[in-house]
Amino acid sequence: MKPLPITSWAVLGLLSFGRELSGYDLKKWADQSMGFFYWSPSYSQIYSELRRLESVGYAASEEVPGDIRAKRLYRITPAGEEALRDWADAAPVEPAVLKHGPMLRLWLGHLQEPARLRETLHAHRDLAEQRRAQAAADVTAAEVHPEWIFPVLTLRWAEQYYADERDRMDRMLAELDTVTGKD
Amino acid sequence: MKPLPITSWAVLGLLSFGRELSGYDLKKWADQSMGFFYWSPSYSQIYSELRRLESVGYAASEEVPGDIRAKRLYRITPAGEEALRDWADAAPVEPAVLKHGPMLRLWLGHLQEPARLRETLHAHRDLAEQRRAQAAADVTAAEVHPEWIFPVLTLRWAEQYYADERDRMDRMLAELDTVTGKD
DNA sequence: CTCCGATATGCCGACTAGACATATGACTAG
DNA sequence: CTAGTCATATGTCTAGTCGGCATATCGGAG
């Protein structure tokens, strides 16, 4: 019995809030609730993780005939809940990993027109502000549910994270002006 | 002729500073200089990227008999430099992606002892401070070379990034205390 | 009336990480 | 003095992951 990858536990974690979800629901909800601080696994990934979780007995599913087309709803099993708790308790926490495309571009700044570079960084700054606003709105919507306290904490964190990101970009743009002489 | 993945351009970018480097050198230098804001491609990845870059004519190499064992030094070709410039100018910049393990743990906070969770977040806080200090030291070492201005800008950004990360963790730990009643 | 987007699932190819394999000299702990 | 570990240097192999495409149907926009 080999250890499961983190993605498996993340998907099982989505199920651990007690709702029955289809693969499609799961993806949408993952994008919304974990998307601010963690990756968004692709649909294909989610569907194959669900099959794996079911095969090891951590999840169970049933076919539900829908209006448009049938779907399969998954729920966590008691065995799955126990395994998830054990994992959260014992597994080492890997450090945060960042893949920052705009910074990579800045690092290669000697290859580009300063004006073009500034455009790129400015677009990133605006995106950060959009995400901050979205996180702020999600906090407001979620904090009325006391059982979502931990997701709310991460949303508050995300709001600050994207505010910081926006402010760093503003400072970086100003610094870039002094370096390239505003040309 | 299909487009190359970003990693190819990142490796070519490492060569664009004009030095001749072995795959081993490249990995070490990538860890040091881009590691703060971008992933660190594995050795296997780097070696296969170098072979690909040479096969499309963007890099050239020569065998150098070393003291201990021979090594192969790569350099960028004029065609590679032009292709890299075109890429930097034209390719869309993908948004930054974060994979934040400690936040994932907080999101699943209902599964864990509050004390254990606090340990995890505190360890992450200390790691952020370490990285901030390292980035600050690298800024000092690199800013004496005027041709490294863009890498220096990204290092200054990284110093602020990890300072912000540290401060957010401090605030999050305080907030967690009020939520879980310091138990 | 046709095209597009949302629902819902899944395959396939390409990309990526990480463990391991190999070879050797230099340091270092018992 | 000798075994173990580290650094150099390159590479194979497995498993994990992403993104594009395929499929099917319904409702709304133009």
Image: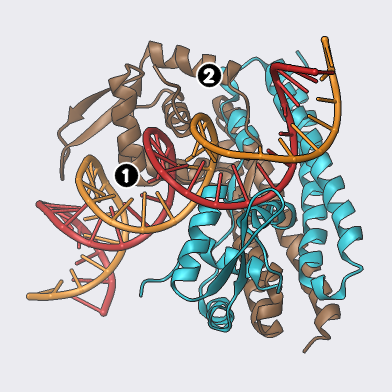
Chain colours: A brown, B cyan, C orange, D red
Q: Position of residue A76 (x, y in %)?
A: 37, 20
SS at mark 1 in the image: helix
Q: Residues within 10 Å of mark 2 (few under 14, many from 20)?
A: some
Q: Residue furthest bottom?
A: A183
User: Are circles 2 and 1 on residues that touch, CB within 8 Å?
Assistant: no
Q: Disc 2 marks which residue?
A: A87
Residue at 74% of width from left, 53% of height from top? B32
Looking at numbered disc 2 in the image, what kind of residue is underneath it?
Trp
Q: In the rendered view, tell whether residue B12 sits above or below residue B102.
A: below
| Mark seen at residue B44 | none
Q: B30 or A83: which is nearer to us?
A: B30
Residue A105 left/right relative to B45: right
Task: Please state the chain letter of the residue tagged with numbered disc 1 in the rendered image.
Answer: A
Q: Amino acid at mark 1?
A: Ser
Q: Chain of mark 2?
A: A
* Residue A120 rendering spot, x and y as whole percentages: 63, 74
Tag of residue A44? 1
- Hey, which quadrant is residue A69 in on the image? top left
**Left or right: where does residue A69 sit relative to residue A7?**
left
Residue B35 vertical placement versus A16 (above, below): below
Rendered-image quadrant of the C terminus of chain B:
top right
Residue A145 seen in the figure: yes
- Real-space Cα separation, disc 2 to disc 1, in angstroms: 24 Å
Query: Measured from the top left, where is residue A73 in percent x and y?
Result: 27, 30
Quadrant housing the N terminus of chain B: bottom left
